[in-house]
Amino acid sequence: MTTTVSDHFDVIVIGAGPAGTAAALRAAELGARVAVAEADRTGGTCVNTGCVPTRVLAKTARIMREMRTASDWGIGGDALELDWNATVARVRETVDRVRSIKREAERFAEAGIELILEGRARFADPHTLVLDSGRRISADSILVCVGGHSRRLPVHGAELAIVPEHILDLPELPRRIAVIGAGNTGAQLVTVFSSFGSEVTLLDVAPRILVASDASISDGVATAFTEQGVSVHTGIDTIEALVRASDGSITLLWRKDGRPQSSSFDAIVMATGWPADVGDLGLENAGIEVVRSAIPVDGYFRSSVSHIFGVGDANGKDMLVQAAQFEGEAAAENAVLGANRRTPHHLLPAGGFTDPDYAGVGLTEEQARERDAQCVVSMVPYSALDRAVIDDRERGFLKLITDRRRELILGAHAVGENAVEVIQSVTTAMAAGIDVATLANVKFAYPTYSAVIGMAARGLLHPPAADPASATPSGAQHSAAEPGVQE
C-alpha cells in the first residue's frame, strides 16, 4: 500500500471503547487536537461482545426463572421453551441499539475529533503510528486504550472450546456445557445456561469460585449453583486436554487431587483470563516492554515512555468499564495539562448478574481484618427483609464492614436480588464519606431491597447480645431472625 503523508495531532487515542471514548472527549474538551484510531467498531468489548450481550442473556435467564415459578403465584399455563435463535437475534438487536444510543462517531465529530477506522494501529517509533491502510499519524501524546481479549488455555484441543465473545455463534443451545473459569464472566454464563435448561459444569483451579470477591460471596453463590443442579469443581489440579469424540461431542480431561477425571459436553467455554490486547501494537518500537500481557504504568497512567499512557484494560489493573472511563479522563488531563491526576480505585463497585446476583465494593472482610483485627462486621440476611419475603427471594445477605470505632464503611458485599444496585447505593455513601451513624438514620422507602443497608448499618452500631452457643464463624450468614455483628 502507498503510505500517505504523516498527520500530526496533539493526542492520539488508540481504541474507541469506554476508556478511549472518555479520554478523547476529555482531551478535546481541554482544547487538544485529537484523533481516535479504532481497528473495528466503536463501543469496545463491553458493548459489542461483553457486558451488554451478557446482560441481555441474564435478563432472558431471569425471565425463564420467573416463568418456572409462575405457578407459585397462581399463574397457570404451560412452560415455554427457549428459542435460541430468537434469543441471539434479541441480543444482537440490543447491542445495535446501545451503540446507536451512544453515538460515539457523532460525538467525536461534534467535538472536532477525527475518528480513523483504517485498521490496526502500530507504533513505528515513540511518536508515530502506522495503520493497516498505510497511513502514518503522529502525536505529542499517545493513549493506548485497546481493551482486552479472552484467551484459551495452552492445552491440547483448546481450539475445540469457544471463548465468551463467541457464545452467540453457537448454532443451538447445548444440552451439556462446561464453563472453565469461575470468575465474573464464567459465573454469569453458568446462570445463563443453567436457566436456559442446559446441564452445566463449572471448573476452576482456584479454591473457590469468584476468588477475587469476599469469601461470603463465593460461598453464597456456589451454594446456590449447587442447589440449582450445577456441578461445581474448584481446586482442580489442571485442565489436561479437549478431545473431539466420534459423535461430535467434546471430551474434557482434567485432574483433581492427582486423579484423572473426564466428562463429555456439547460445548465448552473457556473464561480463563482477560489479557490486554497489546500483543500486536509494535510497542517494542516505542521502547515499551509488555509485562504479564499489559503495559506497566505509574499512578498517573504513564508508561516507561512518559508521553505514552496505558489506560483501562491495557494496563492490566482494574479491568472494569467504570475504571476505564475514569482512567481515560485522568490520562487525558495528564497528557494535555500535565496535571498529574491520580484516579483512586478503592471504590470500584463490581458484581455479576447471576442467580442470585452478587456485588462488592471496598475491602473484603479478610483484607479488613489484616489491617485491623478489631474491625466490625454486620451481616443481615435477606430473609429479614420484607421485600425479599414478598418477592420470594430470601436467599442472600448484605455484609457491611467498618473500623473499630464504627465510623466509616470500609467494605460492603452482597448476594441476592438487586445486589448490584444495593452495593451501588453503599458505594455512593462511601464516596461521600458518610459515617455509619448517618447511614443508619437514612429513611429508606418501604418495601425495598435497599432498606437492608439501613438494617446493616444499625447492626454495626447496636450489635445484638453475644450468644456463644449460636456464634457464627467469620464470613458465614447469620440467622434469619436477627442481623449479626462480628468483632
Image (cartoon, rainbow, N blue to C red):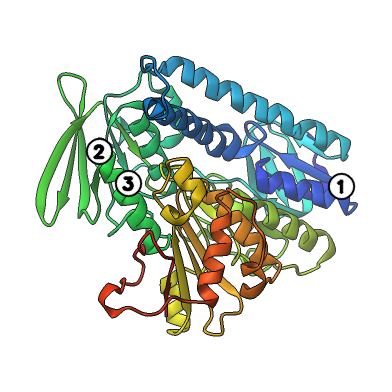
- Between the residue at mark 3 and the residue at mark 2, the CA separation in whole angstroms equals 9 Å
**Measuring 85% from the left and 48% from the top, which residue is drawn there?**
28
Q: Are marks 3 and 2 in contact (CB under 8 Å)?
A: no
Location of residue 391 with respect to 133 vertically, above or below: below
> Quick check: can you spot residue 343?
no
Q: Tag 2 or tag 3, which sits nearer the N-term? A: 3
Three-letter code for the amino acid on which mark 1 is drawn: Arg
Q: Quadrant of residue 185?
A: top left
State the image coordinates of residue 199 (x, y, percent, origin top left): 26, 31
**Measuring 57% from the left and 38% from the top, which residue is drawn there?**
45
State the image coordinates of residue 172 (x, y, percent, origin top left): 36, 18
Q: Are marks 2 and 1 in contact (CB under 8 Å)?
A: no
State the image coordinates of residue 215 (x, y, percent, origin top left): 37, 63
Q: How packed is label 1: few (under 14 Cα within 10 Å), some, or many (20 or more)? A: many
Disc number for residue 33:
1
Residue closer to the observer: 92 or 392: 392
- Between the residue at mark 2 and the residue at mark 1, the CA separation in whole angstroms equals 56 Å
Disc number for residue 229:
2
Q: Tag 1 or tag 2, which sits nearer the N-term? A: 1
**Measuring 25% from the left and 38% from the top, which residue is drawn there?**
229
- Between the residue at mark 1 and the residue at mark 3, the CA separation in whole angstroms equals 52 Å
Q: Quadrant of residue 195?
A: top left
- In this rendering, position of residue 379 left or right of residue 128: left
Residue furthest right as drawn: 31
Observer-side mark, 2 or 1, equals: 2
| Label 3 residue SS | helix
Three-letter code for the amino acid on which mark 2 is drawn: Gly
Location of residue 68 with respect to 391 vertically, above or below: above
Q: How packed is label 2: few (under 14 Cα within 10 Å), some, or many (20 or more)? A: few
